[in-house]
Amino acid sequence: MAAPVTELYEIKAGTYTEWGGFAGMLTYDLPYYDQAFIELTIDGDRNTAEMQILGSELNPFEFLFFGSALTEGTVDGDSAIFRGTSFTPFFHEPGDLDYAIILNGDLLSLQGELTWEPPGFDIPSRFFHSDVEASLVPEPKTVILLACGIAIFMLRSGWRGRQSFLTKGG
């Protein structure tokens, strides 16, 4: 039994749109500050997937009132489908979710939308990603620098730990 595999992809292109509410339709070219990465976890033994969109500082992006992670995706070959009903933790209202990921080597493609009936006309009712393309971020490496006879170890725990640190050794 293999452990689930989590990989990070950097968004290179695409659009994100919020529709409805006071603003009407807002469209953002990707990447942008709130949506710069996609974290994808695949459990090959169960053929399930989880996806989370992350900002440029690896902070979770949240669909308005719906949270950030898409869970219970099904894996079929090189694709993952997230389809079903999601509930807002704030309003406890259902939303219809339909997202698809296609993997092609180190590249990821994402399309999908989340729609719901908000409790007021001032709140967006549709959120969708179009033509999103992302590339795999390689694992960080450990770098050892020698300066004046002192070894400085720069360890980057990378995106999995979402932090980095510097230690000295002698």
Image: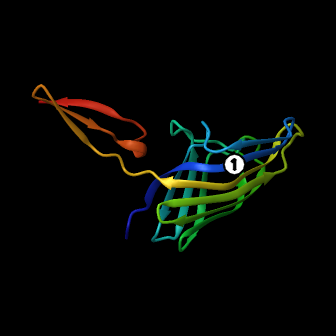
Number of other residues with Cα within 10 Å of mark 1, as a class: few under 14, some 14 to 19, many 20 or more: some
In the rendering, at what x and y percent does residue 22 appear?
87, 35
Residue 32 position by quadrant: top right
Residue nearest the viewer, comparing 146 with 157: 146
* Relative image position of residue 58 (x, y in whole percent): 51, 40
Quarter of the image where one finds residue 155: top left
Q: Secondary structure at mark 1?
A: strand
Residue 61: give x, y in percent of width and height: 61, 42
- 143 vs 30, left or right, is left
- Classify residue 5 by image quadrant: bottom left
Q: How many marks do you count on the picture? A: 1
- x, y (%) of residue 26? 78, 40
Question: Image point 67% across, 59% down: which residue?
Answer: 111
Identified by mark 1, the residue type is Thr
Query: Left or right: where does residue 66 sit relative to residue 10?
Result: right
Which residue extends farthest right? 121
How has the structure been colored for display?
A: rainbow
Work out which residue is located at the far top of the displayed protein and give it.
148
Quadrant containing the N terminus in the rendered view: bottom left
Above or below residue 136? Residue 151 is above
Quadrant position of the C terminus in the picture:
top left
Q: Which residue is mark 1?
A: 15
Q: In this rendering, would 17 be left or right of 149?
A: right
Task: Please tell me whether residue 10 is drawn above or below residue 43 in the rendered image.
Answer: above
Residue name at image x 84 percent, y 45 percent: 118
